[in-house]
């Protein structure tokens, strides 16, 4: 094999390896971009569906109990960030306690139609007496145990004298309930999870390939400069 043929063959092989490395890096970059685009944003509400009545807010206060909602919304955002489900609080009175669960289901359908939400209903039946009910959407990843623990946390926060206002009590309840549910911050669908794993693998392979090529190039350059006759003899 002539010196020129050997060099041409090596250049072709190096070019092929570089192209493969660039391809892996490009695929990894595209995968990472898709993951960022498809990742659910907990700050963004689920879209309205059909004739849903929900206006994008966090609560409906028919009783006028929450003049300042800062603490309430802060706690609800903490719950959404942890659970991946947008909560909504409805404060009202006059619903028969035995009818409250059915009322919650009907109100959920009227408000959201579908989607990943959690409706919590506070029913003030008479002075000093209230009832809680909750309804999660069919698409929600929350379990019955998650919902039960949230309602328990709200009841405890409601009874805590340190929470001086309704907003403080419900906000603290949602925040404490967030700690009880299974962490789902930044939940991914199965497809996005696969993309994430593939992207990580490709990034690692691309990085290994780049390091290998750099080391090989440095070693080859050093060897060719130190022993040019050996290089020519080996490839002639």
Image (cartoon, grey):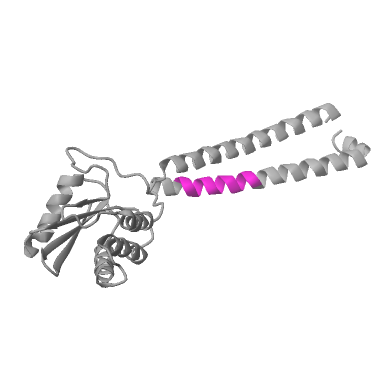
Which residue corresponds to the image point at 24% horizontal and 69% vertical from the top-left?
155
Residue 78 among magenta residues:
no
136 w.r.t. 30: above or below: below
Q: Pick whichever, 60 or 114, lies toward us.
A: 60
Task: Tell me if 26 is positioned left or right of 146 in this view.
Answer: right
Which residue corresponds to the image point at 80% horizontal and 30% vertical from the top-left?
7
- Magenta residues span 195-207
Task: Tell me if 107 is positioned left or right of 25 in this view.
Answer: left
Which residue corresponds to the image point at 58% horizontal and 45% vertical from the top-left?
203
* Image position, residue 207 (x, y; %): 64, 46
| Quadrant the N terminus occupies | top right
Main SS category, magenta section? helix
* Image position, residue 41 (x, y; %): 39, 46
| Quadrant the C terminus occupies | top right
**Rendered image quadrant of residue 68:** bottom left
Q: Pick whichever, 2 or 178, lies toward us.
A: 178
* Image position, residue 163 (x, y; %): 30, 67
Residue 206 among magenta residues:
yes
**Rendered image quadrant of residue 161:** bottom left
């Amino acid at each position: 094999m002539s010196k020129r043929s050997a060099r041409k063959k090596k250049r072709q092989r190096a070019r092929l390896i570089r192209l493969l490395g660039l391809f892996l890096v490009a695929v990894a970059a595209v995968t990472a971009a898709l993951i960022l685009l498809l990742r659910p944003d907990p700050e963004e509400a689920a879209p309205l569906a059909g004739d849903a009545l929900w206006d994008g807010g966090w609560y409906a206060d028919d009783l006028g109990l929450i003049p300042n909602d800062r603490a309430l919304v802060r706690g609800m955002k903490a719950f959404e960030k942890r659970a991946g489900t947008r909560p909504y609080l409805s404060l009202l009175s006059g619903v028969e306690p035995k009818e409250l669960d059915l009322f919650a289901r009907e109100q959920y359908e009227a408000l959201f139609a579908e989607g990943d939400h959690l409706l919590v209903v506070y029913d003030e039946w008479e002075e000093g007496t209230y009832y809680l009910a909750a309804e999660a959407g069919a698409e929600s990843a929350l379990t019955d145990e998650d919902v039960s623990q949230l309602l328990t946390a709200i009841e405890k926060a409601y009874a805590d004298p340190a929470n001086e206002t309704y907003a403080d009590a419900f906000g603290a309840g949602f925040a404490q309930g967030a700690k009880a549910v299974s962490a789902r911050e930044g939940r991914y669908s199965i497809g996005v999870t696969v993309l994430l794993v593939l992207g990580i693998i490709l990034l690692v392979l691309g990085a290994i390939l780049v390091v290998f090529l750099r080391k090989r190039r440095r070693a080859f350059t050093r060897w060719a400069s130190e022993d040019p006759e050996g290089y020519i003899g080996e490839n002639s």
